[in-house]
Image: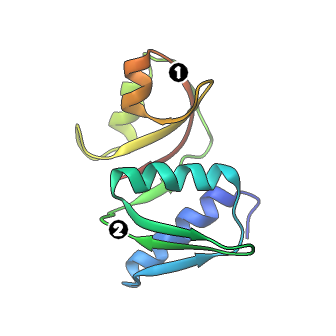
Amino acid sequence: MSQDVVADALNKIMNGKRSKKESIVVTRFSKLLIEILNIAKNKGYIKDYKLDKKSLEVEIGELNECRAIKPRFNVTKDEIIKYMKRFLPAKDVGIIIISTSKGLMTHQDAIEKNIGGCLIAYFY
């Protein structure tokens, strides 16, 4: 177990995906992880998640890979395209989640709103 709750949860999701599980249970979670799962749910990478008092159950959707980005790079609006080429397999495939001053958003939203931020995770 590491100190990074987001990286641990996304690794657990990928391990569940590789072992062909429909859902996984995460015992350590945070508000940041819940916001990341909300964005992933809106994009279809996760079917649903249920939050109990001590656990978080995640149903895996159409997902090929999800990872936390470490170290968390700070990017300007012009550098986002460079990191899209680095972390995503092809153009218009997948999302990078960026923490901005306006909250968490995908890289497409950050480019539209012309703001940069800190890279958190990617899904495709």
Residue 94 at what x, y percent from top left?
Answer: 32, 47
Q: Amino acid at mark 2?
A: Gly
Q: Tell me which corner region of the image, top left, top right, bottom left or bottom right, holds residue 107.
A: top left
Image height of 65 relative to 82, above or below: below
Work out which quarter of the rendered image holds the N terminus and state it.
bottom right
Image height of 35 relative to 83, above or below: below
Real-space Cα separation, disc 2 to disc 1, in angstroms? 28 Å
Q: Which residue is pictured at 72% across the width and 68% down the height?
A: 28
Q: Which residue is pictured at 44% across the width and 58% down the height?
A: 66
**Which of the numbered marks, if any, corresponds to residue 77?**
none
Q: Residues within 10 Å of mark 1 (few under 14, many from 20)?
A: many
Q: Residues within 10 Å of mark 2 (few under 14, many from 20)?
A: some
Q: Which comes sooner in the sequence, label 2 or label 1?
A: 2
Q: Which residue is mark 2?
A: 61
Q: Is residue 67 left or right of residue 52?
A: left
Q: Nearer the viewer, residue 120 or 73?
A: 120
Q: Which residue is pictured at 43% across the width and 18% down the height?
A: 113
Residue 39 at what x, y percent from top left?
Answer: 46, 48
Residue 116 at what x, y percent from top left?
Answer: 53, 21
Q: Which residue is mark 1?
A: 116
Q: Amino acid at mark 1?
A: Gly
Image height of 18 relative to 100, above or below: below
Residue 101 at what x, y percent from top left?
Answer: 63, 24
Q: Which residue is pictured at 60% across the width and 46% down the height?
A: 70
Q: Secondary structure at mark 2?
A: loop
Q: Is there any visible trace of residue 54 in the rendered image?
A: yes
